[in-house]
Image (cartoon, coloured by chain):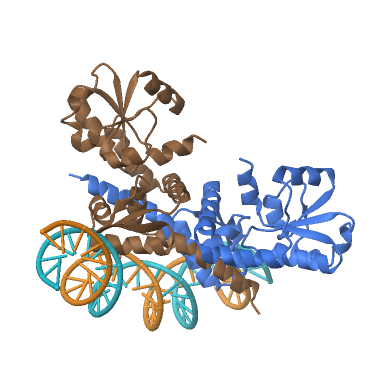
Chain colours: A blue, B brown, C orange, D cyan
Amino acid sequence: MVTNREIKNELYEQVSRIAKASASPKRLELLGLLCQAPKTVEMLSQEASISVKLASSHLQDLKAARLVESERHGKNMIYKLASPSVANFLVTLRELAQERLTELQEAVRQLGESAHEWTGTTRDELLQQAGSGDVVVIDVRPANEFESAHIPYARSMPLSDLKARLKELPKGKKIVAYCRGPFCLMSDDAVRLLRKSGYDAVLLRDGIVEWNRRAG
Amino acid sequence: MVTNREIKNELYEQVSRIAKASASPKRLELLGLLCQAPKTVEMLSQEASISVKLASSHLQDLKAARLVESERHGKNMIYKLASPSVANFLVTLRELAQERLTELQEAVRQLGESAHEWTGTTRDELLQQAGSGDVVVIDVRPANEFESAHIPYARSMPLSDLKARLKELPKGKKIVAYCRGPFCLMSDDAVRLLRKSGYDAVLLRDGIVEWNRRAG
DNA sequence: GAAACATTCTAGCGAATGTTAGAATATCAT
DNA sequence: ATGATATTCTAACATTCGCTAGAATGTTTC
């Protein structure tokens, strides 16, 4: 006979598998990267600044928890998020951490101090201004992530190309740069470069997942 | 000088604190209990079937992650959820686990097989029928949890008192029993008892947190 | 089939975690 | 103050985890 206690233990055991898989900074970072687009082990390891071996090991943990899936493409293994719910969970987790942990609030506040963040208008107003061409929204992530999904009206202008392609941007208009999300600092770097070159640039902390969530 | 990499490491380190605190079945169960109402260490340890010492230790881990708060009331330490966002996160985590883990789906499916679950009508229809008195919604959790928060029109009828108070319930009407949520089996026990006594009883898997979430 | 490449598997180490039991602390009732 | 009660602190142990390095696997290219 199976007792209620044994059933409960099994249920919570299963839920904890997801939480355990999320309980490592590097695995969280890998999940965050996979929210942008499918990637190979090597891409992931480089972007998370860890060895390929360690990345592979973490990815297999995530796979065992069914948070990601993998598929062979020739020599490469392509990892991708198992479901959009995983991205949603990840944002919920990040937002809870930001609400509860003063240490995290402080770190994020310091980021905001040095950066010029886009403020004062709502999401819908930004969308409208981007549509009419009053502001130029640039996506500074690598091109393949832009292709995977991007904010409406945004132009792909990867950070690595930005310096060479500065002349494509109009000096008179406000430039809004965004990247992978609040913990990605590519838009910070982009705005710094743009302002040094005389542009009226600000950054948007949201990534594509956060942006879509606010659509409600 | 602080590099981007160091900043990112710190940010993800902080987020992982929340996930680590959630990465134990027993801590998840304790959080689930605290979603119902504030409780003493002893109550929590009994309901989670662990020793007081172990409960205390887990609760302090949760406190260090700022997910719960404690306050002394005379001899007792009362623990409570630090914020409603924690309950919301917990439900998101449970739902993700249920979506992704076939092992969990299977376990929940087996529960559903033996139980008589409330089906066929929407949340709003149940609410209306409960309001008009066509169905009787009973809350079988301990009374203090009912007092902390409950579904509209529900009557408190703790599982421990149910047998003695059966005569209070009308035989002609449908009885809908609910408890702490999908992983709490008190409503299963209640419905079994009621049906054996000739009542037309079904159970609602939602607890108060899930119910309020669906309000949108 | 051999060489090159991308990834995974295996083994090992130090650090962190879950659990238990005994000592210590804080509060209440007398 | 004293004893009873509730909780936390400390120490100890086995287990698991994060990371590294070397061997092994599967795929492409020649």
Query: Up-down: is A177 above or below B87?
Result: below
The x, y position of residue A89, in whole percent, is 51, 51
The x, y position of residue B10, in whole percent, is 55, 70
Query: Up-down: is A159 above or below B210?
Result: below
In the displayed structure, does residue A103 sit left or right of residue B182?
A: right
Which of the two residues, D27 or B7, is positioned nearer the viewer here? B7
Point out the image quarter for the C terminus of chain A: top right
Q: Quadrant of residue A76?
A: bottom right
In the displayed structure, does residue B1 sit left or right of residue A95?
A: right
- Residue under the image location 65 percent in, 48 percent down: A211
- Residue under the image location 15 percent in, 30 percent down: B164
Q: Quadrant of residue D1?
A: bottom left
Q: Is residue A27 visible?
A: no
The x, y position of residue A170, in whole percent, is 89, 56
Which of the two residues, C23 or A132, is positioned nearer the viewer here? C23
Query: Up-down: is B124 above or below B60?
Result: above
